[in-house]
Amino acid sequence: MIYRKLLLLTALMIAATTPKAGAQQPTPHYEIAGRDTTCRIFLYSPEPTKGVHAAYLTGKGTWQDMGQLCASDYGPWGKEKKMYDPYVLHAQDGTWRLLFAVNSYAPCFGAAYSDDLVTWRPQDFPRMKERGVLSPLATQKDAENIGIYFKTNDGSTHYVLASNDFRHFSESGTTAGTVGWLRDSATIDGRRYPGNAFNVSKKQYDRLANHFINTANEAKENSESLRDDKRRFGHTTATVKAVLDVDMQKRKKISDHMMGVFFEDISYAADGGLYAELVQNRDFEYSKEDHRGWTATTAWTSNKPVVIDSCNPISKNTPHYAVIARRDTLYNVGWGGISAAPMQKYDFSVFARNAEGGNNVLQVALIGDDGTVTAKGRIKLKGHVWQRYSLPLAVDSKATRQNVRLALTTLKDGCIDVDMVSLFPNDTFKGHGLRKDLAQAVADLHPKFVRFPGGCMSHGQGIGNIYHWQESIGPWQDRKPAKNIWSYHQTRGLGFYEFFQFCEDIGAEPLPVLAAGVPCQNSAADSDGYAGQQGGIDMKDMPAYCQEILHLIEWANGDTATSEWARMRARAGHPKPFNLKYIGIGNEDLISTAFEERYGMICKAVKDKFPEITVCGTVGPFHNPSSDYIEGWKFANAHKDIIDMVDEHYYESPGWFLHHQDYYDGYDRRGPKVYLGEWASRGSRVENALVEAIHLCNLERNGDIVDMASYAPLFCKEGHSNWNPDLIYFNNDSITRLTPSYYTQKLWGTTAGNEYIYSRLQIADSLRYRVAASIVGKLSADDESAGITPGNEAAKQPVGQLWLKLVNALPYHLEIAVNGLAIPNGTECYGFTGAPNDSQVEPYRSSIKGSALSLPPYSVVIVPLNGYNSK
C-alpha cells in the first residue's frame, strides 16, 4: 500500500469514469459559447497542489472552471506532488501532451499523454543532466517527434527531443534559438491564470462535461453509509420478504484458493510483532536512517554511556556491537517492556567475546520495574573470538506478572563485546520463532496463500532500499538489516525462510512479491534531487536483478543434488523443496515507461526459465478508472504470454462496495486472472464487515476470473499505526482486538468452495443492493490443489459440503424463502450481527425452523449443508 491511496478522489480525476452498461448518460448543463460544433476550453493550474484544470467559455464570455483533469504524481506526499507551469500541446494526431515542472531543483520534468483529455497515461519523469528543470514547453517538430524546451536556474535554455508516443526523451543540450515562452491567459473567479486555450469539438466538450458530472454523481453515491440508515429508512421493525431461487444444475468452477492473507511489515507487524524476538535493536544497527533520533544504542541503557564499536565485527552485514565495561550492566527495555509471568520460560542467546582475551562470566537476568530479579543465569565466556552462547531462563514461581528489562552484567574484570542479543519465548508457533497468538490468529483464517513481505516495503524507499530477498536468509548475523519504508528498522529475522516455513505450517501457498526494478513511486529524493521511481534500476544492472529473482525460485524449488541455492535451503533446515507456485512482480507501482521496461524484462526472464510458475503482475494502487489501472491492464493483456495474473488494490468507502457489486462481471475471461491483493472498506466497524461480506459474495460469483483475494493490512501494534484500518490489533501481551472484518474473512476462509452454484434473489429493487447471497460447494478434498499440507488437517473441508452465505445489510429483519435447495428443518446456521457503528460483532447462531430463513438486521449468516452431489 502507498500514500497515494489517501487521495483517491484525485486519482479518480486522472481517468475517465467508465459508465455502466446501459446507463443513461447525463446531459451537460453548462451554457457554452461558440457554434454547435466548436467549444472553447482553457487548461490551467489554480495552484501547484491542484494539478491541471479545465475551464470553458460561457455564453456570457466568461470562463467557468469545470474541475481537475490530472494532478502531479511525482515524489512523496507532503513535500512533492506539485505541478508548476503546466503546458499542454494539442498534437497533430489529435492527442494531448502535458509538460510541467515538478519543483525548482529536481533533474526531471513531468510528461503525460492523453487521447481525449479525460483518460491520462501514467506520468513519466525523464531524467535530465541539469538540476532545476523549469517552465517546460512543447512544439510539434514533425509527425514523428516533438520538441521540448525548458529553462534552468542559471537562465539557460535546453532542448529535448521526444518520441511521438511521448515515452522516450533525448536531451540535446542548450540552444541559442529564441523560444516563445508566452502562454494564453484567462480570468477565472476573479483571478488571472496562465494556461493554454483551445477550440475543441462539441463531442470532445461533452465528453469532458460528462466526466465531471459522472465523477460528482459517483462520489455522492459512494458516500452512502449504513450508519445513516435511520435517516434513510426511518425507524421500523418491519420484516422484508425475499425469495432465493437456486439452480443446482447451473454451476461453474471457481478458484479453490481465493481466500488468503497479505503480510506486510507495517505498523510493527514483524519486529516487535509476529516475529517473537523480545529484544529491541538486538543487532545494534538502529540509526537515524531508520527513524529520526534513533542510534545504535536505542532501547539500550547502562550505568555508563553505552559504547558501540565496529572493529572486527561478527559480520560485515551487522558491523556494530556493544562493549560492556568492567563490572557494568547493559539493559534492554524490549518493545516498551518485556512481559513476564511466573514460570514463564525464555531462550536467551548472544554472540560474545572477551575483548582483551582470557575468560569472563556474563550474568543474564530479567529485572522488574521495582528492581526485583525474576530470572537469572550465567554464561562462561572463553577467548577473544566471537562465539554464540545460549541460556534457558525461567521466571521465578513467586514473581508477580510485570514488565521487566533484560540485564547483561560482567562479573569479572575485562570488557565484553556483545552482538545479536536475543530473547525468545520458549513457546513459539510450531517452535519456529513466531509469536504464538498472532500466528494462530492468522491460521484460524484458514488462508490458502500468504503474500509477503510487502507491500511498499518490497519496492522500498528509493532504489537503495529495494528489498533483496537473499539478504533475509541464512544465519541471523549474516542477514542484512535495512530501514523500513514505514520509518523503522528491519532486522530481517523474519526473512524469506521464516515466511516460507510459516506458509508450510498453516497449509498455505507462499506468494513472495519482489520489486519490478523500480522503488516506490513516493520515494524521497536521492542525492541528485531525483524522487519517485528515480528512473529505476539502471538497465545495465537489470540482468543481474532478473537473475536474483530466478535464484529465489531455485532456492525454493531446486534440487540439492544440482543447485547451490537449494543446498542453502537445506543447510537452513529444509532439504525438501518448498514447492513454490506463484511469484509477484511489482507492487501497485506507477505504470510508467521506466516501470514497463523493467517489469516486462523480469516477467519474461521468469517465464523463460520457469514456465510453470504463475507470474502475478500489478495494475497500480486504484481500481478502474485510474490511469495506472488502465495502463497496467493494457500492458498485461498485451503480454499474456508472460503475465498470468494481475494484482489489483483498492481501499474504498462502504458506499463504493454497495454500489459496485457488478465490478468484475464484465471482465474478459480470456485475459489474465485477478488477484485482489489489497482491499478493505475504509473503517473498522460492523458496517465495514457487512459490505466486505457483500463484496466477497460477488468475488465468489466471479471466482472464475478472480483467483485470489487478501484483506490488508493484516497486523497493527497498538501505538505504532501506519495505516487504518487493520485486521488484527495487538500489544506486547495479547491480541487487543479482532475487528469485525476479521470475522468476515474467517467465515469465508472456513467455507471456501471450488464450485459456484447460480442463484437469483427476488426482492424489492430499492433494497436489492443491500442483500447478497452466494452458494459454493466443495467438489473434492484434493490436498495439493487446496494448498493443504500434512499437519494442518483442520483446514481440510469434507467432500460434498455446501455453504449458503447470506448478507443482510438492511435495518429490517429479512425472511428468505429458498427454492431449489433443500434445507432440512433444524439445520444449524451461524454468523454475526451488530449495529453498523459497533466496533465488535455479536456472534449469531440459530436453528432453521420451517421453510424460510430469518436473518436479523445487519447480519451475515452461513448455512452449511452436507451431502452435496457434485455431478
Image (cartoon, helix red, strand yellow):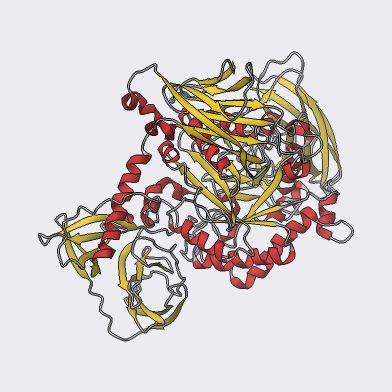
Q: Is residue 20 above or below residue 802?
A: below
**Spot occupied by residue 406 in the image (x, y as percentages of width and height):** 70, 30
Q: Is residue 485 above or below residue 632?
A: above
For image coordinates 74% across by 34% down, the residue present is 799
For image coordinates 75% across by 53% down, the residue present is 315
Relative placement, left or right, of 375 versus 332 is: right
Relative placement, left or right, of 24 versus 544 is: left
Image quadrant containing the C terminus: top right
Q: Which residue lies furthest to the bottom in this view?
A: 176
For image coordinates 47% across by 59% down, the residue present is 630
Relative placement, left or right, of 125 versus 151 is: right
Along the line of sight, which residue is nearer the eye, 124 or 773? 773
Along the line of sight, which residue is nearer the eye, 650 or 563? 650
Number of dots carrying numbers: 0
Q: Is residue 497 above or below residue 241?
A: below
For image coordinates 61% across by 21% down, the residue present is 829
Q: Residue furthest top?
A: 398
Q: Which residue lies furthest to the left in this view?
A: 60
Q: Which residue lies furthest to the right in this view?
A: 561
**Spot occupied by residue 577 in the image (x, y as percentages of width and height):** 82, 51
**Spot occupied by residue 579 in the image (x, y as percentages of width and height):** 78, 50
**Spot occupied by residue 194 in the image (x, y as percentages of width and height):** 22, 66
Examine the rendering and report whether any part of residue 493 can be seen.
no
Examine the rendering and report whether any part of residue 703 can be seen.
yes
Question: Residue 295 falls in which quadrant of the image?
Answer: top right
Along the line of sight, which residue is nearer the eye, 322 or 530? 530
Relative placement, left or right, of 316 versus 588 is: right
